[in-house]
Amino acid sequence: MGKSVGYPIGEQDFKSLRNMECVYVDKTSFIMKILQQRSKYLFLARPRRFGKSLFLSTLRYFFEGERKLFRGLDIDRYDWNWEKYPVLYLDLNTDRYSESKGLDEVLDNLFRKWEMTYDVKPTTDDLPQRFKSIISAAHEKTGKQVVILVDEYDKPLVGNLNEEQNFNYYRSKLASIYSNFKSSAEDIRLVFITGVSRFSKLSVFSDLNNLRDISFSDDFADICGITKRELLDNLSHGIHTLGSEYNISFEDACMRLKENYDGYRFARKGSDIYNPWSLFNAMAEGRIGSYWSRTGMPTIIAESLKRINADLEKILNTRCSFDTLSGLDLASPNPVALLYQTGYLTIKNYDIRTDIVTLGIPNIEVKRGLLDILLPYYVKVRHSTPDTVIFDIIDSVRSGKPEEMIKYLDIFLAGIPYEMKMENENNLHNALYILLTLIGIETHTEVLTSDGRIDMVITTPDYIYIIELKFKHDSSIAAHQIEEKGYDLPYAADRRKLFKIGVNFSADSRHLDKPVIKER
């Protein structure tokens, strides 16, 4: 029997991880890149559960001079004096911030500890002024400039997006705290800030005009997450174990991991990145599952997409500039930026000529997680709807039975709430797109042809379904449009059996009418 392997699930402290002899994917080479930066103010945005906290912890122990923890790692090859610096680790990921006083309590507890460490006797209750005094005292007492690490700087803001009073309070409070980074510049060696989003128009970092955002930097593309090379070098034992559980080869196990957890990209030239949280959980459990999506349910995403009546397939496969992705205006959040910064979209391609990126969903796990979040916002299924309807939809689509497919889709859609504005076709298109994609059926909406746009195309290895949807009209009108505009012509050379389906959604009965179906 080989030695059992420990996976660092939920372990964010570098020292504890090294002492436990868990799997550690070496990211210490990035410390040297940080030391070589001209700017001493750095910001990194990455989605949740991507290893930001662990990297900050690694920085902490490095600057505290604990060389023994770094023996054998990349950074140990460099000539570094391993002197101890005063480190102020500002961890804002420890509270839910449901009340405005939550941040004050977190900061007060931290400041009290540092005031004792550096012999500071506070002369005021003002938190920003206390922080400034601590920075100055730490430098004076140790003779070393201070290293400030801010973990999840935006946690109080993200947790209060729908609580305007708390949100405004936290915004003002954080801005006053962070203003010390500039006013205390002579006392500071390095400031490294992490978060999910870099919010625009919030003045949180308004004083830091020399803050360098490395979130899109090619040099730091894989500072968090796991590359293919790192996967094979560090997790081969787990891949073999996973293959044994599924009775598949090592190569097939790698492919399943790639399909489910790979596909993230955070820079112009960056390679694909695996989600570390999902990888480690899959290794520990010996099962491919949805791990990352369980760690949060960002309802703001669903509410934002629903509010602007977005075409979901277009949003989830779109092109934009880096400027669009780099800031988030919470007063009117851009859904593309929101989905990217929270990890539901990622960079799929970059065109150097236009400086435009193509975005898409990273992998199967993220797609399922996102659609699980969005589905209730478009389709509210009645409790009386049997679970077997889902399987009936799948079977009818895969078996080439369009009449049954429409019948079961109608049963499922019967639970759409009456308050939904059904006069807008996007609502029904989005509901069907989410449902069919979620259950594993390849579906495309608004498919462009030479003479129009097909409402929906569903494909399987054996069948193609061209569907035209109408509202308050007649199914025959929808079927006539398919014929008149030749929607089937792009598939003339395809040998799969093709169904042309015209169907109307009745506003009165709130059901799909009897479809008009023609075969090719």
Image: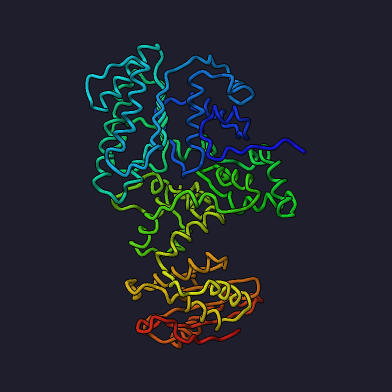
- State the colouring used for the structure image: rainbow
Please name whichever residue, 277 or 498, is drawn nearer the observer in this view of the structure: 277
x and y, in percent, of residue 407 in the image = 51, 81
Looking at the image, residue 380 sits to the left or right of residue 71; the answer is: left
Residue 454 visible? no
Q: Residue at x 36, y 42 (%)?
A: 96
Quadrant of the rendering where the C terminus is positioned: bottom right
At horizontal 44% and vertical 36% (from top left) the residue drawn is 44
Mark yes or no: residue 92 visible: yes
Q: Nearer the viewer, residue 479 or 386?
A: 386
* Residue 374 on image: x %, y %: 43, 61
Residue 41 located left or right of residue 23: left
**Quadrant in which the N terminus is drawn:** top right
Q: Is residue 253 above or below residue 192?
A: below
Q: Position of residue 118 (x, y in %)?
A: 36, 16
Q: Nearer the viewer, residue 184 or 445?
A: 184
**What is the x, y in percent for residue 169?**
25, 40
